[in-house]
Image (spheres, rainbow, N blue to C red):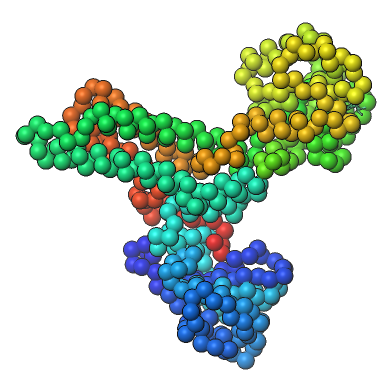
Amino acid sequence: MSLFREGITDSIVALATPNGIGAIGVIRVSGPNALSIVNLLFKSKNLLLQPSHTLHVGLLRNGDEIIDEVVLALYKSPNSYTGEDVVEINCHGSIFIQNRLIETLIKHGCRLARPGEFTQRAFLNGKLDLTQAEAVSDLIASNTEASKNNAIRNIRGGFKSDLMLLRHKLVHFSAMIELELDFATEDVEFADRSDLKNVVTELILKTNRLAASFKLGNVIKNGVQVAIIGKPNTGKSTLLNALLNESRAIVSEIAGTTRDTIEEVLNIEGILFRLIDTAGIRVSTENSIEDIGIQKSFEKMRSADLVVYLFDLNTTSIADLETVIADFNKEGINYILVGNKVDVSDKTELFSSFQDLLFISAKENYNLETLKHELVKQVIEGEINTDATIVTNVRHFDALTQLSAALVDIELGLTQQLSGDLLSLDIKKCLYYLGLITGEITNEEQLDLIFSSFCIGK
Ligand SMILES: Nc1nc2c(ncn2[C@@H]2O[C@H](COP(=O)(O)OP(=O)(O)OP(=O)(O)O)[C@@H](O)[C@H]2O)c(=O)[nH]1
Ligand SMILES: [Mg+2]
């Protein structure tokens, strides 16, 4: 991208609020000429003479035409989101006014921003590092409390500070080993090998912890698939409806009511769950459609992140349950065992030997809060409310995985007492992967790819 080398000379404009009608719309202008271009349309006062971080009410005009009465917010370089001069125009939220304003700004010298270009400029001007810039993208896309919090934490630099610390320690050793190479003939050792080993061990732990957080991070971003599995008539559809608080699935006393899977999204304690109601599983039926449904239930059972195995307390034997548990364990399926219809059962005692078994009544809404809480617990095991950094981005995850492998190489090299020049190569490899994440090492193509996933106006 030419901007990267030549410096930024043009000013960009885009609608920052969603397309469509709203109470107000915000149009953002950024660039070296942002103030002077808006000033051409604003006759009430000279914006060039106003201090940064001030608001100004007045009319915006295109020649004789009054486009709208607006509130302008001024942010002067370098104290703005992009690091450039920025004007945010708060106009009335009609599509016509918004389009007219953008058209007029373009006529007076602005260019329509590409997706993510505001954030890209913030990055190019050193306002954000790459992890922070990508967190902005995640924040825009975040639709649950937990993913919002995680994105905000990354913007504040939680991720960056962790990685910076690691990087500094490595840079130090890299420098010391380089120094040794300069004095090669004198056989000196500036970089204490046991200190280096300690640092590398610590780095491996941290890197692996960050990489492991990816699964959780991904769960926060994309949701957790929960398949409700059980025999016919156990109350699976009733449970789905009760959790959603609406009559989404058909419920009846006829076994084999649900034929196709139904998926609905539910936000519990800030985590997105994708609940899947399935056809009740039974051995071969006379009905081919039901058989296809049962086949699907098995597929969902295997592909889901978590299975809620629902059984009817009145019709299930201990032996039945033991068989199910053995099958789940054999297949490596994560599951929660839930006994339903506790409102009409006196058999709970029978199951007292099973650990972690929940008794509910889907019909009477009994103990469903406990079930919800258990779902959340299974996913995060208490991690989400801590300040732990969570990796949600595939690119970061890849780099962390490579980093981890490169760190193991150093560790191995130290055990084998490799020479300084070979160690130095491995350390540089680690620094490279760390730099890929924080944006200190990058190339234009990679930047374009990252920022193009943003929406226009960010
Ligand atoms: N007493 C009582 N009845 C329930 C409970 N949950 C479900 N039922 C009843 O059990 C019957 C079957 O419920 P469904 O939700 O259709 O069962 P299902 O597991 O989806 O059945 P299939 O789709 O056929 O596999 C209905 O008559 C429900 O009203 C409960 O907690 N207590
Ligand atoms: Mg059903």
User: For the view shown, which residue lies furthest in the bottom direction?
Assistant: 64
Q: Residue 416: where, in percent of width, then height? A: 23, 22
Q: Quadrant of residue 163?
A: top left
Q: Can residue 162 be spotted in the picture?
A: yes
- Image x and y of residue 398, in percent: 44, 38
Compared across the picture, whether 415 is left or right of 140 comes to left
Q: Residue at x 54, y 76 (%)?
A: 54
Quarter of the C terminus within the rendering:
bottom right
Q: Is 193 or 3 nearer to us in this picture? A: 193
Q: Position of residue 294 (x, y in %)?
A: 78, 23
In the rendered view, does 213 fall on the left or right side of 98? left
Which residue is depicted at the point 43% across and 71% down?
A: 77
The relative height of residue 145 versus residue 57 in the rendered view (above or below) is above
Quarter of the image for the N terminus: give it: bottom left
The single residue placed furthest to the top in the displayed view is 319
The answer to whether residue 102 shows anywhere in this view is no
Q: Is residue 414 left or right of residue 366?
A: left
